[in-house]
Image (cartoon, grey):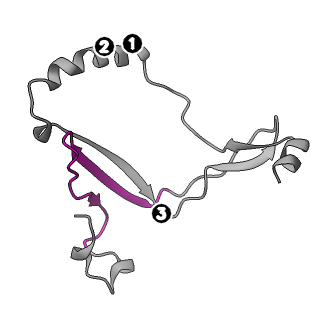
Amino acid sequence: MDCFRKRHQIVFNELCGESSDVNSETIEEWVAKLPSIIQEHEPEHTANADETGLFFRVLPNKSLCLKGEKCSGGKLCKEGLTVFIYGFMSGEMEKTLVIGKTAKPRCFRNLDIWTLPVQ
């Protein structure tokens, strides 16, 4: 399959994506500043957290197309949940926090949601 793909110049392209990037000077400043900030705190008191979107009805964002051909997709479904993940420098992870639209979604009607490893 790989030889066929190369012979016919079929590539795996991203349909849509972000074009902006992070300022490298800002990264270098924080990499230099971070060790002095962290050394004042114990590893079990130092945490890192981030939120991300969990889109459960979205189509793939990559597709096969001919080399040089513009690859564009339609409007993506944005239905999903916001997930907040955090852990400590010591390696301990906390329960994932899920921010949804309803207290008990219909897809969980036959399930005890308190047994899931999320809040």
Q: Are marks 2 and 3 in contact (CB under 8 Å)?
A: no
Which badge, 1 or 3, is on the more N-terminal residue?
A: 1
Q: In the image, what residue occupies the spot 81% across and 49% down?
A: 2
Mark sitting on residue 56: 3
Which badge, 2 or 3, is on the more N-terminal residue?
A: 2
Q: Disc 2 or disc 3, which is closer to the eye?
A: 2
Q: Disc 1 or disc 3, which is closer to the eye?
A: 1
In 3D space, how far apart are the residues under numbered discs 2 and 1 (Cα atoms)? 6 Å
In 3D space, how far apart are the residues under numbered discs 2 and 3 (Cα atoms)? 37 Å
Q: In the image, what residue occupies the spot 34% across and 55% down?
A: 82
> Does the magenta-highlighted stretch encompass residue 101?
yes
Q: In the image, what residue occupies the spot 29% across and 70% down?
A: 102
Residue at the outermost bottom position = 110
Q: Position of residue 29 (x, y in %)?
A: 31, 13
Three-letter code, disc 3? Phe
Q: Which residues are magenta?
A: 78-103
* Camera-side residue of 12 and 52: 12
Say left or right for 3 vs 93: right
In the picture, which quadrant includes the N terminus?
bottom right
Three-letter code, disc 2? Glu
> Pointer 2: what residue?
29
Three-letter code, disc 1? Glu
Say left or right for 3 vs 83: right
> Pointer 1: what residue?
25
Q: Secondary structure at mark 3?
A: loop
Q: Are marks 2 and 1 in contact (CB under 8 Å)?
A: yes
Count of number-bearing discs: 3
